[in-house]
Image: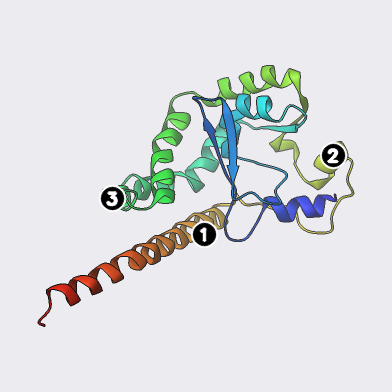
Amino acid sequence: MACRTSAQRTTPSGQAARVGVDRSRGNIFISGSAGYDAITDLPSWLFKEIVSTFPDAKFVLTERDHEAWRNSIAKTLQPLDALLSSLMIRFVGLVDSYTHYLSSLSGNFCYVLYGGYFGPVNEKAQVEALKVYLLVVRLEDGLGWEKICSVLGHDVPDVPYPRANEAAEFQKMVMGDMSASWKRTVLNAASVLVPVVGASVWFWGPK
């Protein structure tokens, strides 16, 4: 499988793969992930569970300067934090699971950003990763297809390396995902409410 295929599968348009852990059983589950062979970003918080579930997986750990990381967060996640933690969004989260998921993450991001959690996570990951194949790269030194494909044994694709965390693209991606989820929730609710309302009108209406 070529790196190009990996890029298409790990940067899909539309629904993204969801990763979670059933801690009572110690199992990791991936839904909506048909055809995916890689996970990135948030699932790194589940590093230990991922290593346990996929012992033959190859890992790439990206390190970066703490202040540069904080500046990146300030341009991507912080503008969304006020929205995600608002009463309106939390109310929508009562009926929309994806919105609830994003809203609950906002508090976790604040802890990571202000609670000094950045360094310990990287240190723990490096220790745990001694058991698995790992490529460690420093983001300031540059990260692209060349470094990744060289360790995976694939040819470098002729498509641009994805930059999904650029501020404008990140905001567009999150709001697009939320809008799509809201639309699905409204349609699902309508499919239930319309027949109920219709039956009520027929039952209670004039005969």
Q: Amino acid at mark 1?
A: Lys
Residue lying at 34% horizontally and 49% vertically, measured from the top left = 93
- Residue 90 in view in this figure: yes
Residue underneath mark 2: 152
- Residue 41, horizontal then vertical, whole percent: 60, 40
Nearer the observer: mark 1 or 3; the answer is 3
Residue lying at 85% horizontally and 49% vertically, measured from the top left = 1
Which label's residue is closer to the chain start, 1 or 3? 3
Residues at marks 1 and 2 touching, judged by CB atoms closer than 8 Å = no
Residue underneath mark 3: 91
Tag 3's secondary structure? Answer: helix
Residue lying at 48% horizontally and 43% vertically, measured from the top left = 74
Q: Amino acid at mark 2?
A: Leu
- Image quadrant of residue 65? top right
Q: CA distance from mark 3 to mark 2?
A: 44 Å
Residue underneath mark 1: 172
- Residue 121, horizontal then vertical, whole percent: 58, 24
Nearest the camera: 104 or 86? 104
